[in-house]
Image: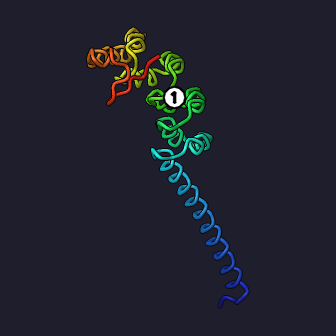
């Protein structure tokens, strides 16, 4: 027969293990919920610029990508994200219609071909940058930029402030 002292110790060990598991899962859930909330906030078109600037300090690359893509992100934040270690974040910056031309020029010479490739498929970039990418050493980047240049209509190139399509220019 098992004595009550052993049963009590066994129950305490079980209860402690269950409690620890509960706390760990609750913390994981809270972290996951926070990340999802940050993603939603960074993706919304009505998120205030100061909130986007705060979200730009997040560690999650997926959140930073959404901040970089958001048209309400302040220019200084876009310039900061254009220097981020993640190529995905830098590529997302190149998609933002408010990124300064000097930043686009810097990104068009990015060391990561994935960033340049992403830029090369963007028909809103200025023809100057697309022609630079069409001469890229990476054949995939060069080919994509050439195809994008062929897709651009002459009216889009002439009219830099087309109402339906804002060109990203220098």
60 left or right of 132 in image: right
Give above or below for 125 relative to 32. above
The image position of residue 56, as x and y in percent, is: 59, 39
At horizontal 48% and vertical 40% (from top left) the residue drawn is 66
- Image quarter of the N terminus: bottom right
Instruction: Out of 116 and 138, give the one closest to the viewer.
Output: 116
3 left or right of 28 in image: right
Instruction: Out of 121 and 161, give the one closest to the viewer.
Output: 161
Instruction: Out of 148 and 124, give the one closest to the viewer.
Output: 124
Give above or below for 162 relative to 32. above
At horizontal 33% and vertical 18% (from top left) the residue drawn is 159
At horizontal 50% and vertical 45% (from top left) the residue drawn is 42
At horizontal 39% and vertical 8% (from top left) the residue drawn is 135
Local SS, label 1: helix
Residue 157 visible in rendering: yes
Quickly name the residue at label 1. 90
153 left or right of 13 in image: left
Question: How many residues crowd around disc 1 within 10 Å: few (fewer than 14), some, or many (20 or more)?
Answer: many
Q: Quadrant of residue 53?
A: top right
The image position of residue 36, as x and y in percent, is: 50, 53
Give above or below for 27 relative to 49. below
The image position of residue 47, as x and y in percent, is: 51, 46
96 left or right of 147 in image: right
Q: How is the image coloured?
A: rainbow
Instruction: Out of 11 and 75, give the one closest to the viewer.
Output: 75
Q: Quadrant of residue 137?
A: top left
């Amino acid at each position: 027969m098992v004595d009550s002292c052993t049963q009590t110790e066994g129950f305490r060990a079980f209860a402690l293990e269950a409690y620890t598991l509960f706390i760990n899962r609750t913390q994981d859930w809270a972290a996951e919920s926070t990340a999802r909330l940050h993603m939603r906030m960074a993706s919304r078109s009505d998120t205030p610029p100061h909130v986007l600037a705060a979200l730009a300090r997040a560690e999650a690359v997926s959140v930073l990508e959404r901040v970089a893509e958001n048209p309400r992100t302040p220019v200084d934040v876009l310039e900061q994200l254009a220097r981020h270690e993640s190529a995905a974040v830098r590529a997302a910056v190149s998609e933002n219609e408010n990124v300064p031309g000097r930043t686009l020029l810097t990104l068009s010479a990015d060391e990561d071909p994935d960033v340049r490739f992403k830029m090369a498929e963007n028909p809103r970039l200025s023809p100057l940058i697309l022609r630079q990418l069409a001469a890229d050493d990476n054949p995939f980047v060069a080919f994509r930029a050439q195809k994008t240049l062929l897709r651009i209509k002459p009216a889009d190139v002439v009219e830099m402030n087309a109402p339906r399509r804002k060109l990203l220019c220098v």
